[in-house]
Image (cartoon, grey):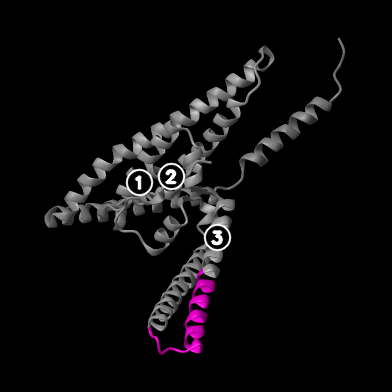
Amino acid sequence: MDFSRDDNAPALWRTNRHKNLDQRILEFQDVVILGPAAHGKGLRATRFAGAGVAVAGLCVAALGLLSVIITGADEYSSAHAMGEASFILLCGVVVFLVGRLILGVARRCAVMRGAVTRETLTAAPQDFTDAFRRAVNAADTIGESLAYQEGWLTDVDLDAALWDLAQHLETGTRLHDVLQAAPVGLEYHEQVEQARAALDGCLVHLRAGADRLTGLVGRVEALDVELTAPVRRAELEMMRELRARHDAEQMRRLSAAAAEVEFIAPVFGDVVDRAAGVLDAYDELPKNPH
């Protein structure tokens, strides 16, 4: 697999400025998108632990290296002092490697549970990668907006939207690879054409998703401008409060109307059953032949 395409590095993909610690660790691990099953607290804690151990190991190794340099430059230093400095350096390296091992385990678990990595992007067709990049950039822009951060975009899950597109990216990549090796023959023509149609569908879905997210960016930015104006923000907050009250009142009425169903007397079934019973009795009466 070709890793020379540095344009697929997460540092260039996720260009948002306000990255939290976990996002930076994922970037270090070459992870671009996590699936829902890989967003667990356990894996996040493992990443934090691995990063902490690795950083501690680097600090100890740096201290040991500095000690080795100073001790080596001192002509009066003893072999024992050099040995201690070398031991500190070795301990730092070992601790760093342990941290990298923990990060590696966390990364493998994340990939098994669903994640888009640099390798995934490198293996994908360029058309798929370009569309997915646009979607990620648009989602990052929306995610950093004031409207999103302060909860004005209620029930908007950008991670779920990106994971939907990511699944089409991965499925499209597999279809593309399998089609490259598909057998040639009239007896396979229908299946091959179905696979190509599915591949085209994945690309269409990716491009449409990227277009829709990109189209939302301008509207979100316009809302941000309104939110930064105190007077307009106060108006929006008042309208949002009024709408919340209206929605709550409508839901109260809906619940009350639905509850009324439970108080309706179940008469209909008894009436119909009684009528059917009477008709059955008439049907059982002997009929006089003419």
Name the residue at the top extreme.
290
**Mark 1 secondary-structure assignment:** helix
Q: Nearer the viewer, residue 41 or 56?
A: 56
Residue 105 image point, x, y percent: 58, 61
Residue type at numbered disc 1 = Ala
- Label 1 neighbourhood size at 10 Å, few (<14), some (14-19), many (20+)? many
**Residue count near mark 2 (Cα–Cα under 10 Å), binned few <14, some 14–19, many ≥20:** many
Name the secondary structure under disc 3. Answer: helix
**How far separated are the C-alphas under marks 2 and 3?**
24 Å
- Cβ–Cβ under 8 Å for marks 1 and 3: no
Q: Position of residue 144 (x, y in %)?
A: 30, 53
Dividing the picture into quadrants, the one containing residue 68 is bottom left
What span is in magenta?
74-96
Q: Earlier in the sequence, mark 1 or mark 3?
A: 3
**Disc 1 designates what residue?**
139
Which disc is residue 104 wearing? Answer: 3
The quadrant the C terminus occupies is: top right
For residue 260, side relative to residue 145 (left or right): right
- Identify the main secondary structure in magenta: helix
Q: Which mark is residue 162?
A: 2
CB under 8 Å between callouts 2 and 1? yes
* Left or right, 290 with reference to 192: right
Q: Position of residue 64 (x, y in %)?
A: 44, 79
Query: Three-letter amino acid code at disc 3?
Result: Gly
